[in-house]
Image: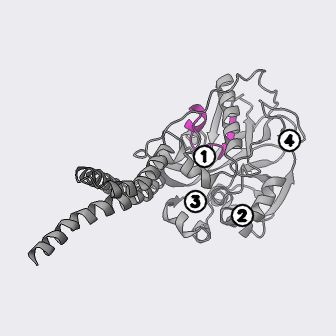
Amino acid sequence: MKDVQERRGGRAPLFAAAGLAIVGPLVLGVTSIRIVATPSTPLQIVWVALALGVLGADAWLGVRRRWGLGLAALPPHVALALLLLGYAGSPLPAPPPLVGELPSASPPDGMRLVALPTGVIQRSAAFGYRGGSPLERRDFAMTAVLVEHPRGDVLIDTGLGRDIDAQFGLMPLQFRAVTTYARARSAAEQLDAAGYDRARLGGILLTHAHWDHASGLPEFPGTPVWVTTEERGFIERGGWITAVARSARDAKFTEYDFEGGAYLGFDRSHDVYGDGAIVVVPAPGHTPGSVIVFVTLPDERRFAFVGDLAWQLEGITEREPRPWPVRVLADVDEAQVEQGILRMSAIATRFPEIAIVPAHDARAFASMPTR
């Protein structure tokens, strides 16, 4: 009886080590995704402790020469390694130099930009671009931009609306589990508080129709919402990610086309008012109808609102797309996203005076006036 108990007692550490070696990497993978999406110091401590435990279990199995169990633990270890490599830096190759001069523009006097910050989402740098640190916390901006123009003001995206809490309930549980936001006043609330005349607003120009860009649409009933034909179709068939846009029953979606010629390396363009002040180019990939909006002000400052082509400036300046664990869920066509990044990288190199504004990089909005 004593021998049996001793044998059973000897098996307990074996089972514990085997379980930790096989299941531990899977738990580490899930925890890694959670930490990258929403940084958490306690989770980071748990991750380190679990990683040390897995290494210890691997060593124990090796010393005991339990090769069969080691082989069983190999697939989850490989899966974890591939997941972590997906966040590692790997810059896209440098694009060919952009040739030509800046397109001409005649922005009217009085035209200006106003940033309307509507909230933030807490993420890590690693969530935004390959090579970013999972330990670096960043507030991903949710900001609308009002372009004041004598022929009609244009609102680029809406940011988070006042009904975001209810809208967030339309998102799947697994998304809500890794997303934490802090809402400020909506764009409409800020404009109303400033005494803004809604009659001046000519239209809302969406860079794309994801929930965090279209949340405020219900607060602008009857205002034209300019989208491409491809994006209009995506709103209807995009599933949960465009549920907020679909729920805006009073939104007046208005489709436009790219009737203009080439613009800064993009094959087609749409000049909103024909004066070169607000020019839209197609940049599909993140969504089928994503666009980039170029704005030129009377003082010759130029901006490129790239939407979610990149979430952080490093996506363009370092040519680092989103990490693949994020891209497979965020982008409908990764190759098109990379093409757009390379085009914008060439523009940034050729014309550094153009301020590139990723929709969720708070640093890019820092110098803009607010209401």
Report x, y in % for residue 136: 42, 44
Marks 4 and 2, the one that precedes in the sequence: 2
Q: Which mark is drawn over residue 185?
A: 3
Residue identifier under label 1: 370
Name the residue nearer the viewer: 134 or 306.
134
Q: In terms of secondary structure, where does tag 4 sit?
A: loop
Name which residue lies at 69% across and 65% down: 239
Residue identifier under label 2: 245
When asked about the image quadrant of residue 46, the answer is bottom left
- Asked if 107 appears above or below 325 in the picture, the reply is above
Image marks 3 and 1: residues in contact by CB distance under 8 Å: no
Name the residue nearer the viewer: 289 or 250.
289
When asked about the image quadrant of residue 183, the answer is bottom right
For marks 3 and 1, give the CA distance.
Answer: 12 Å
Q: Residues within 10 Å of mark 2 (few under 14, many from 20)?
A: many
Marks 4 and 3, the one that precedes in the sequence: 3
Q: In terms of secondary structure, where does tag 1 sit?
A: loop
Q: Most extreme residue toward the left, as rendered?
A: 2
For marks 4 and 3, give the CA distance.
Answer: 30 Å
Kindly identify the amino acid type of the residue bearing the numbered disc 4.
Tyr
Name which residue lies at 47% across and 55% down: 33
Q: Residues within 10 Å of mark 1 (few under 14, many from 20)?
A: some
Q: Is 270 left, or right, of 341 in this rendering? A: right
Kindly identify the amino acid type of the residue bearing the numbered disc 3.
Arg
For marks 2 and 1, give the CA distance.
Answer: 25 Å
Residue identifier under label 4: 273
Report x, y in % for residue 306: 68, 42
Q: Which residues are magenta?
A: 302-320
Q: Nearer the viewer, mark 2 or mark 1?
A: 2
For marks 4 and 2, give the CA distance.
Answer: 26 Å
Name the residue nearer the viewer: 51 or 243.
51
Kindly identify the amino acid type of the residue bearing the numbered disc 2.
Ala
